[in-house]
Amino acid sequence: MLLIGIDTSGRTASVSLLDADTEVFLGEKRVYTEKTHSQVIMPMVKELLEQTGKSVHDINCIAVAKGPGSYTGLRIGIAAAKAMSFALDCKCCGVSTLAGLAYNNISYQGTICSVMKARANLVYTAVYKSNCYELDVLMPEKLISRDELAEFLAFNGTEVMLCGDGASDFFSDYRSPMFIIAPPQGRLQSASGVCLGALHQEFVTADELEVSYLQKVQAEKINERKSKEQIK
């Protein structure tokens, strides 16, 4: 089974190609970019397939980071995955960005905490237990304050590896001998983590693929505020 992974949930855009039968990554492209992901993601897919000697018709399934993360970035990634799924008549899979981050560091045996910046003092986070192959959820993904996360990890009582774009600040601000930080290559989002996460999930049709923001988008917030004002 040839699985292609896409991650456009943050500043890093990445594409990865995994032969799931042999568990060999055939290739990956990753770029930390200022450009809109819509400008780079499909050219990256094309280049990766060309360089690995594969065709789009060789792809059996598609995995994509479904959130949390950048609203625009997530929509671009999901749209790309849906379009490819429809065109190739193959199944797809949405993988939590937080789980994908943890799977980037799956070789670490122990507790892994994914931390992504949200707004103010809030973070998107989830905590997992890794056995070097798959993850068990210790704390489901949620939007909480950094203080709440620090308290949860303190009561956890074990060494914790931190990853995600909020890991470095969290590590510096809440220094603890129980915290270690993922190396640079495993700290930010990567399509390889999305691919690994997809191996432990059910694949769905393109129609069933959805984004998971973990918080309301700006339009929803504006509509709610207008509704409240009208009621008053």
Image: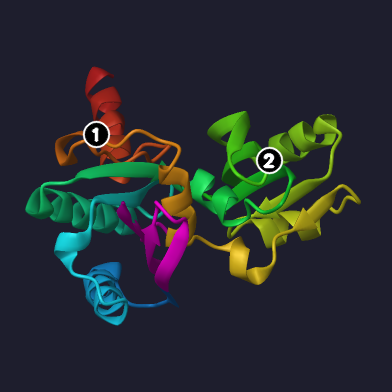
Apparent side of residue 138 relative to residue 213 in the rendered image (left or right): right
- Which residue is pictured at 38% across the width and 68% down the height? 13
Figure disc tally: 2
- Residue 108, horizontal then vertical, whole percent: 71, 52
Nearest to the eye among marks 2 and 1: give it.
2
As drawn, 31 above or below 154: below
Q: Return the disc, 2 or 1, that comes first in the chain's sequence.
A: 2
Residue at 59% over, 38% down: 135
Which residue is disc 1 drawn over?
223
* Disc number for residue 122: none
Crowdedness near tag 1: few (<14), some (14–19) or many (≥20) residues, C-alpha within 10 Å: few
Residue 192 lies, in percent from the top left, at 46, 60
Quarter of the picture containing the C terminus is top left
Q: Residues within 10 Å of mark 2 (few under 14, many from 20)?
A: some
Identify whether 113 is placed above or below 164: above
Q: Is residue 183 above or below residue 202?
A: below
* 17 inside magenta stretch: yes
Which colour assignment does the render follow?
Answer: rainbow
- Name the mark on residue 131: 2
The part of the chain drawn in magenta is: 1-28
Expressed as whole percent of the image width and height from the top left, the position of residue 87 reads 8, 54
Viewer-proximal residue among 90 and 37: 90
215 within the magenta span: no
Q: Identify which amino acid the numbered label 1 is placed on.
A: Asn
Residue sitting at x 26%, y 77%: 53
Q: Secondary structure at mark 2?
A: loop
* On screen, residue 84 above or below 98: below
Q: Amino acid at mark 2?
A: Asn
Residue 202, percent from left and from top: 34, 33
> Where, by quadrant of the figure, is residue 51 drawn?
bottom left
